[in-house]
């Protein structure tokens, strides 16, 4: 006859494959919220970003900031300027520079398309969000046209009117 264990053992709990929602691609690593306020976002592109190991770890821990960043095409290559990625806290002397210029990776057809559109008057490349996709850092780059002050006021008026309309509709639904 087999001996019974002194205390019942619990089966090992299943490991959660999605421990970090940012690294799993469920949550954005960085978002440029002011981009939609300052620019008309006309078209969006997904690009890869050439990063070092400490930069990826910093992005994963939420130390990326896209507020003042912009894209630039130089010598048929796409570059990301002024994107601040904070230093990795466990990094050593090989830690990265926070504001270094980073190369963006796009297909040649997309690059040709972007070259043609950015040469038009008033169009620029603005990063809107940074996220993980299949373990790689991706950047959403928007082709944007700058807003004037009256455009910003008009957008705010429209947003307020839409909000009031939704609230009125919900009050009518609750009343009946």
Image (cartoon, rainbow, N blue to C red):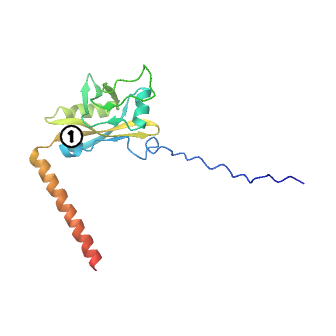
- What residue is drawn where x is 39% and y is 28%? 51
Residue at the bottom extreme of this rendering: 176
Residue at the left extreme of this rendering: 150
Q: Secondary structure at mark 1?
A: strand
Give coordinates of residue 101: x percent, y percent: 30, 25
How many marks on residues? 1
In the visual, does 140 lie left or right of 167? Answer: right
Residue at the front extreme of this rendering: 6
Task: Look at the image and tell me in which quarter the N terminus lies.
Answer: bottom right
Q: Say few, some or many: other residues with alpha carbon within 10 Å of mark 1 (under 14 / 14 to 19 / 20 or more).
A: many
Give whichever of 141, 111 is nearer the camera. Answer: 141
Q: Which residue is mark 1?
A: 144
Q: Quadrant of residue 77?
A: top left
- What residue is drawn where x is 22% and y is 62%? 163
Give coordinates of residue 164: x percent, y percent: 20, 65
Task: Look at the image and tell me in which quarter the C terminus lies.
Answer: bottom left
Residue 84 higher or lower than 94, as above or below = below
In the visual, does 65 lie left or right of 41? Answer: right
- What residue is drawn where x is 42% and y is 32%? 56
Residue 11 higher or lower than 176, as above or below = above
Q: Quadrant of residue 145?
A: top left
Residue at the top extreme of this rendering: 93
Give whichever of 42, 37 is nearer the camera. Answer: 37
Give coordinates of residue 142: x percent, y percent: 26, 40
Give whichever of 114, 174 is nearer the camera. Answer: 174
């Amino acid at each position: 006859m087999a001996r019974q264990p002194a205390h019942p053992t619990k089966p090992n709990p299943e490991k959660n494959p999605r421990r970090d929602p940012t690294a799993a691609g469920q949550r954005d690593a960085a978002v440029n919220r002011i981009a939609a306020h300052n620019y008309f976002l006309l078209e969006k592109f997904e690009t890869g970003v050439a990063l070092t190991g400490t930069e990826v770890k910093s992005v994963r821990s939420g130390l990326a900031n896209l507020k003042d960043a912009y894209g630039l095409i130089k010598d048929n290559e796409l570059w990301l300027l002024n994107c601040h990625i904070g230093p990795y806290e466990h990094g050593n002397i090989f830690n990265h520079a926070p504001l270094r210029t980073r190369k963006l990776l796009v297909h040649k057809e997309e690059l040709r398309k972007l070259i043609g559109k950015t040469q038009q008057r008033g169009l620029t490349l603005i990063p809107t969000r940074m996220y993980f996709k299949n373990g790689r850092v991706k950047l959403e780059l928007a082709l944007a046209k700058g807003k004037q002050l009256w455009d910003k006021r008009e957008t705010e008026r429209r947003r307020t009117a839409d909000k009031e309309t939704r609230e009125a509709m919900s009050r009518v639904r609750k009343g009946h």
